[in-house]
Each structure stands twice: as structure tokens, then as C-alpha cells.
């Protein structure tokens, strides 16, 4: 009896182990979708649930997220208490000054405010345990040309790069609708000009929809992608109205080719945070829907 039982148990456990090994090797989950080492987070500024910092963190935790991307210059004590109470992690920190006081500004005084905001974001990230900050490098408008934006922002980011190194936090450049860096080749040229191991890319998947498919950007920027903004876009809606109309869709209801995007991320070995910057999180139910749809995206 004992011998028969042990043999049967061994056969069953061995079969189970082989099955698990096969799942691990294929990267498939029990449900048939890909299992990837991408952790769900959400950008603090997009949390529409009303309440205090603590209450917003609690709502995010309840929805199934693992992290939050706070804004720079928030009350550090309040944010740290919310992280400690909920167990959420800091996925990134978003610089608070980069739009209003861009590093590309013609006057030195404005650039100084932008630089100080960048440094503050780095210090906040260090305090929260985030490995990088999100930075919009500059803005091409009000007479500022592409070339001027490029040169001025490179100078300022190069000044900040050693500070980032000392703090152990990287600067991650985000592609946004600032009329600057509209092709993956330009993204590579910009990073090459900065030429620092402390500077990489914060790739916003939805923002590139206006220009070209996200899956065409990932191979070129490659391992310099430090973080992801997960955002849906519809080229169909953009074609029917203003470009911004393309963001008026839920996750998985736009024209993003998520399987192709995830496949390209697999090829570069991306592991880390996938941060939602998406409308719809105005209620606990809305946050849960965002969280569930992100699971489906990451398994596509």
C-alpha cells in the first residue's frame, strides 16, 4: 500500500512538475495568455477617485494595482505614509515643472525653474524608492524651434545626469505631443546626444499613435526603455476628428496592436513597470476595470 501510494504520488508530482516547467518555458499562463514580468501601476494625476492622498492610494490598491507614479513636489511625508500604509511601490515620479517651465525655454530664469523641478523629482524618487523619473525634455512652441529645443534640453539634462547618478535614480525621457521627437530615430539621436548611463526613455505607447505604430519604436530604442506608460489610442477616431480624439477609447478598444507591442517588448527583454495613464479611473469600479484590462494587455 505504502509503496504503491508513493509511486503514484511520484508519478503525479513529476507530471505536474513537467507541466509547470512547460508552462514556464513557453511563457504561457494557465489561462493561455502570456505571463510577463510587467507590474501594474497608475499615474497619480489620472486617479479620478475623490479623496486624500491616502484614500486615492487605498482605492488603487483595492483595484489590484501594485504601484503608483506620484507627481514631483507632492508632500513627501504624506506620500510616504500612503506608500507605507498600502504596501504600494513607487513606479516612477513625474516631474511637475516640465510643461510650464520647460528646459527648452529661451530665458535662463525659466530653464532654472525647470531644472530645479527636475532635481526635486529626482530627490522625491530617491525618497520613495523609485528607480527613475518621467521628464518631458522640452516644448517646441512660442518661437522655440526643434533645434533650439534639442540643444537647450540636452545641456540641462547633461547637468542633471550626475545628480541622478549620485542619487541612484535615472532620468527617463517621455515622448509626448510637444512637437519634439516624433520618430524613433529622433529618440535615439536625442539619447545619443545626452550620452549618459543615467538617462533613458519612458515610452508612452499611446502617444506615438499619432505618428507611427508603437511596435516600430520599441526595437530602435531597445533596452534604453526604462518604464512604460500604458495608454490606448485610436487612429480611426483621430482620422474622424482632431488628433486628441484618438485618446477617447478604453483599453483594448482602440487601434493599438497589443500582441505586436508585447512581442517587441519581449524581444528587448523588458521587465518592470507598466504605468496606466488612461481615463476611466473616476470610481472604484473604473479603477478595477482599468486594472483588469491591463491584465489582458500584458497577457496578449
Image (cartoon, grey):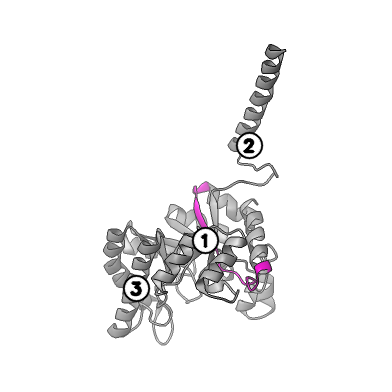
Q: Is residue 249 left or right of residue 220?
A: right
Q: Marks 2 and 1, Cα distance to the nearest angstrom?
A: 32 Å
Q: Which mark is residue 153?
A: 3
Q: Closer to the N terminus: mark 2 or mark 1?
A: 2
In this rendered view, identify the residue nearer to me: 176 or 65.
Answer: 65
Residue 278 within the magenta-colored segment of the rendering: yes
Q: Earlier in the sequence, mark 3 or mark 2?
A: 2
Visible in this render: residue 150? yes
Horizontal side of 170 relative to 37 (left or right) equals left
Viewer-nearest residue: 141 or 286: 286
Callout in the foreground (3, 2): 2
Q: Which residues are magenta?
A: 267-285
Point 45% across, 70% down: residue: 181
Q: Which class describes the residues within 10 Å of circle 2: few (<14), some (14-19), or many (20+)?
A: some
Picture quadrant where residue 80 is located:
bottom left
Q: Which residue is mark 1?
A: 86
Q: Is residue 232 above or below residue 142?
A: above
Residue 260 is situated, as x and y percent measured from the top left of the image, at: 61, 53
Mark 3 vs mark 1, foreground winner is 1
Where residue 99 is drawn, which disc sits there?
none
Q: Is residue 241 above or below residue 29?
A: below
Q: At which x and y percent is residue 209?
A: 59, 68
How many numbered marks appear? Answer: 3
The earlier-in-sequence mark between 3 and 1 is 1
Which residue is tagged 2?
23
The image quarter containing residue 78 is bottom left
Query: Element under label 3?
Result: helix
Amino acid at each position: 500500500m505504502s509503496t504503491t501510494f508513493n509511486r503514484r504520488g511520484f508519478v503525479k508530482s513529476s507530471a505536474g512538475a513537467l507541466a509547470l516547467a512547460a508552462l514556464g518555458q513557453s511563457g504561457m499562463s494557465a489561462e493561455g495568455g502570456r505571463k510577463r514580468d510587467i507590474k501594474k501601476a497608475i499615474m497619480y494625476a489620472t486617479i479620478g477617485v475623490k479623496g486624500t492622498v491616502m484614500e486615492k492610494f487605498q482605492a488603487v490598491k483595492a483595484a489590484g494595482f501594485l504601484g503608483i507614479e506620484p507627481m514631483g513636489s507632492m508632500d513627501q511625508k504624506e506620500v510616504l505614509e500612503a506608500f507605507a500604509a498600502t504596501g504600494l511601490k513607487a513606479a516612477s515620479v513625474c516631474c511637475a515643472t516640465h510643461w510650464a517651465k520647460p528646459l527648452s525655454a529661451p530665458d535662463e530664469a525659466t530653464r532654472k525653474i525647470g531644472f530645479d523641478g527636475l532635481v526635486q523629482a529626482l530627490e522625491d524618487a530617491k525618497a520613495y524608492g523609485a528607480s527613475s523619473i518621467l521628464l518631458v525634455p522640452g516644448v517646441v512652441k512660442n518661437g522655440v524651434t526643434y533645434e533650439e529645443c534639442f540643444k537647450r534640453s540636452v545641456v540641462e539634462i547633461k547637468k542633471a545626469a550626475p545628480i541622478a547618478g549620485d542619487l541612484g535614480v535615472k532620468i527617463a525621457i517621455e515622448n509626448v505631443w510637444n512637437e519634439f521627437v516624433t520618430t524613433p530615430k529622433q529618440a535615439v539621436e536625442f539619447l545619443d546626444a545626452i550620452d549618459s548611463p543615467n538617462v533613458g526613455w519612458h515610452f508612452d505607447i499611446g502617444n506615438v499613435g499619432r505618428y507611427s505604430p508603437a511596435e516600430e519604436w520599441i526595437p530602435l530604442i531597445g533596452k534604453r526603455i526604462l518604464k512604460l506608460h500604458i495608454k490606448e489610442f485610436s487612429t480611426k477616431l483621430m482620422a474622424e476628428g482632431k488628433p486628441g480624439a484618438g485618446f477617447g477609447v478604453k483599453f483594448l478598444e482602440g487601434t493599438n496592436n497589443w500582441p505586436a507591442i508585447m512581442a517587441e517588448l519581449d524581444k528587448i527583454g523588458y521587465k518592470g513597470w507598466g504605468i496606466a495613464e488612461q481615463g476611466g479611473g473616476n470610481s472604484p469600479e473604473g479603477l478595477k476595470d482599468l486594472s483588469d484590462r491591463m491584465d489582458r494587455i500584458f497577457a496578449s
